[in-house]
Amino acid sequence: MDYKDFTCKVTEFINIIDVEETKNIERAAEMIYQAMRQKGLLHIFCTGHSHMIAEEMFYRAGGLIQVNPILEPFLMQHEGAARSTKFERLPGIAKIVFDSVVKLPFEPFLIVSNSGINAVPIEMAECAKANQNPVIVITSKTVSKELASRIPSGKHLFELADVVIDNHAPNGDGIIMTKYGNIGAVSTIASVYIAQRIVLAIISHYETDGITPTIYKSANIDGGDEHNKGLFDEYEKRIRSLY
């Protein structure tokens, strides 16, 4: 098997995102920037493998301080993969998690779910909407439209979003077809790329307005810890995962 096939296909997906999703990425970035200008946060909620997108945007060298990842261990594989899948499908959990988040109504929620059919991410979007929080979604419309929603209303996650960014991942996620099934999952790569595109677009807004963004430095370079500590002091009470 030639790895270059995978490389070429991943490159194709990134090119598709650049062509078809740049406007949506820019809309999301504008929404987040306006909240950050008011000292607000971006709240990110994901389940399963998608939680990596929240981690990608949080406490990241070159990333923005004003990011609050909502990381619930019972919805992640390391607490039990099969169990986390069952939890993700349970109605009512999202409201409990949402109510535990310290948030302001103008602060956007970024919700990432490749399928967009399970109860917890969909209900999290419903909670955010009910609280007047803008909702940004990263999902695969291709996958979502092919699958039945697992909530009684039949709604899919993308239908609840103010801004939808499609990662264009195929059903089954793998982009290399073999006799064993599809391999070479692409949804995380595509979604992380989108996440970093959003960060770059937000920083561009800061630059346009002549404002210095609050950006982390690597903790592994000289002065990194001291720089980051200065950022922590302002937001430590609102970003639960900082300590």
Image (cartoon, helix red, strand yellow):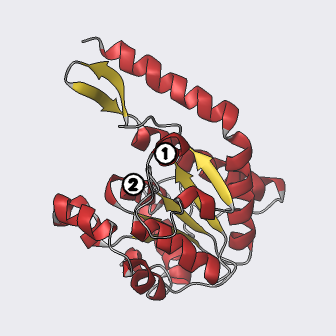
Amino acid carrying mark 2 in the image: Ser
Give the residue furthest to the right. 209
Query: Left or right: where does residue 108 sit relative to residue 46?
Result: right
Coordinates of residue 139 in the picture (x, y in percent): 51, 50
Would you name the residue on which mark 2 appears? 50
- Residue shown at 67%/83% (left/top)? 105
Amino acid carrying mark 1 in the image: Ser
Q: Nearer the viewer, residue 209 or 104?
A: 104
**Mark 2 and mark 1 in contact (Cβ < 8 Å)?**
yes
Q: How many dots with numbers? A: 2
Q: Is residue 223 visible?
A: no
Is 176 left, or right, of 57 in this rendering? Answer: left
Vertical order, 119 against 203 (above or below)? below
Residue at image coords 40%, 63%: 150
Q: Quadrant of residue 222?
A: bottom left
Query: Looking at the image, can residue 84 be seen?
Result: yes
Residue 118, image x and y in percent? 40, 62
Q: Secondary structure at mark 1?
A: helix
Furthest toward the top, the residue is 2
Identify which residue, 145 or 218, lies in the foreground: 145
Q: Which residue is mark 1?
A: 191
Question: Does 183 sit above or below residue 198?
Answer: above
Q: Residues within 10 Å of mark 2 (few under 14, many from 20)?
A: many
Q: Position of residue 177 (x, y in %)?
A: 32, 20
